[in-house]
Amino acid sequence: MEKELETLEIMKRVEIVYALDSRDELPGEIILTEAVESLLSEPSTFHLFYKYLNHFRDKYRMKIAEDIAASYCQYMLKYQGTNALPFIRIGFGLAELLLGYGAYEDVESVLLSLMNYLAKNPVLENWIAMYEALVKIMEINNININFKRSDWARGMFAEMARKIKLMSFGQDILDESG
């Protein structure tokens, strides 16, 4: 019951932020708010959020999860910084939330946005995140019975694995991640 009440409080904050964002009164991006960070902070409670997200979508035509995903994608197009770690964490958290929610196309959009940003700075940490994103894209396309996209992702992650393996300790990293 405690987790349910905590979930309700987080959803109240997300709803307020969403309303401000829809009126263009939110200073900044919805994806960078504390409310969304709270929503994504504990994947083990995502199932508690789905009923609220469905309620808002069905009763009020508010596509909160989808709009948060769109905000992430737009932000990643504009972001010029080099500190990728927070956006990797947000991207994968959002992808997990959307995957459980059944928003497969939004999951892929989020992960592709993350990968496009990471590709601008080809360092090992970014390659590993890209590898993991490609594995997730392959997974969601298999779930969604989109085998052409799944094959594309498999080919891309095989290429990324090849690049990582060229590093002196690359094989060890791949063994740990997957």
Image: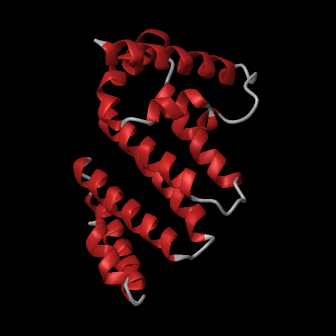
Residue 71 shows up from this direction: yes
- Residue 150 percent across, percent down from the top left: 30, 62
Of the 4 image quadrants, the one containing the C terminus is bottom left
Residue shown at 67% from the left, 24% from the top: 21
Residue at image x 51%, y 54%?
88
- Nearest to the observer: residue 77 or residue 46: 46
Could you tell me which residue is drawn at 40 percent across and 77 percent down? Answer: 160
x, y percentage for residue 144?
A: 26, 47
The quarter holding residue 80 reads bottom right
Pick the residue in front: 107 or 168: 168
Residue 103 visible to the viewer: no
Left or right side of 116 for 6: left
Viewport quadrant of the N terminus: top left
Measured from the top left, where is residue 62 in percent x and y?
A: 51, 19
| Residue 4, quarter of the rendered image | top left
Q: Nearer the viewer, residue 109 or 1?
A: 1
